C-alpha cells in the first residue's frame, strides 16, 4: 500500500501557489542487506549473504557502466542513465564545459511491468495521517502544521 500526505504549496507566486498536493510517504527504507534478507525468504535456496554479494556486485557494475556513458535496463523495474544539468549559452561559441555544465544526475525511467500505467492499476493509496488545518494564531489546537518548504524549494510535481 502506498501512503501519502497532503500538503499546501507555500510558494507566494506561480500557478500552484497555495494549492494542495499529495506526496508519497515511505515508512521504511531497505538497504542492500535488508533487501537480500527479504529476497532470501521468497522460496529461494540462496541465503541473504549470497544474495547480498550478488546485489553488491550488480551495483558496482551498474555504476561502472553508467560512468562509461551506457544506460542499464533492469527488466520490469527501470532503465538507469546519467543526465546532465546545464545552463543556456547565448551562442555556440559562448558554450563551455566550465560555465554551462552545472551537474550530473541519476535518471531512472520505469519499464515493463513497473510502467506508470501498470503502477496506477496495481497500487492502492492510503492517507498517512488525516490532514488537520492549523489553528488560528494564538489558539490552541492539535492540528498538524504543514512544512512550509516540503519540497525544499523545488516545484511540485504537476503529474500528481
Image (cartoon, rainbow, N blue to C red):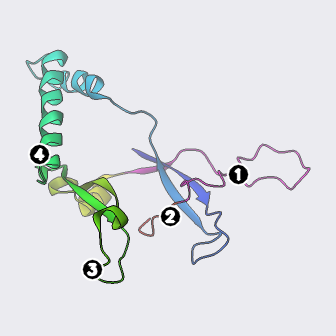
The part of the chain drawn in magenta is: 124-153
Residue denoted by label 1: 132
Q: Position of residue 39 (x, y in %)?
A: 20, 27
Would you call the spot at circle 4 few (<14 residues within 10 Å), some (14-19), or many (20 or more)?
Answer: some
Q: Compute the Cα span from label 3 to label 4.
A: 31 Å
Q: Secondary structure at mark 2?
A: loop
Which residue is identified by label 4? 65
- Residue found 42% across the figure and 33% down from its top: 28
Please name the predominant secondary structure of the magenta segment in the image. loop
Question: Dot 3 corresponds to which residue?
Answer: 93
Q: Earlier in the sequence, mark 1 or mark 2?
A: 1
Q: Tell me where residue 6 appears, x and y as whole percent.
A: 58, 55
- Reply above or below: 113 against 26: below
Of 77 and 58, nearer the camera is 58
Q: Could you tell me which quadrant the N terminus lies in?
A: top left
Which of the two labelled residues, at mark 1 and mark 4, occupies the earlier sequence position? 4
Instruction: Give the residue drawn at x 59%, y 76%.
Output: 14
Amino acid at each position: 500500500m502506498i501512503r501519502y500526505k497532503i500538503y499546501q504549496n507555500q510558494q507566494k507566486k506561480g500557478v500552484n501557489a497555495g494549492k494542495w498536493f499529495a506526496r508519497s510517504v515511505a515508512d521504511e527504507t531497505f538497504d542492500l542487506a535488508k533487501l537480500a534478507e527479504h529476497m532470501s525468504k521468497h522460496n529461494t535456496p540462496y541465503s541473504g549473504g549470497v544474495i547480498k554479494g550478488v546485489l553488491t556486485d550488480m551495483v558496482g557494475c551498474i555504476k561502472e557502466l553508467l560512468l562509461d556513458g551506457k544506460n542499464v535496463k533492469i527488466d520490469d523495474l527501470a532503465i538507469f542513465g546519467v543526465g546532465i544539468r546545464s545552463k543556456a549559452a547565448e551562442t555556440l561559441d559562448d558554450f563551455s564545459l566550465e560555465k554551462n555544465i552545472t551537474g550530473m544526475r541519476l535518471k531512472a525511467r520505469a519499464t515493463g511491468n513497473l510502467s506508470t500505467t501498470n503502477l496506477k492499476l496495481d497500487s492502492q493509496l492510503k492517507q498517512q495521517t488525516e490532514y488537520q488545518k492549523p489553528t488560528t494564531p494564538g489558539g490552541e489546537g492539535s492540528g498538524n502544521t504543514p512544512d512550509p518548504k516540503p519540497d525544499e524549494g523545488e516545484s511540485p510535481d504537476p503529474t500528481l
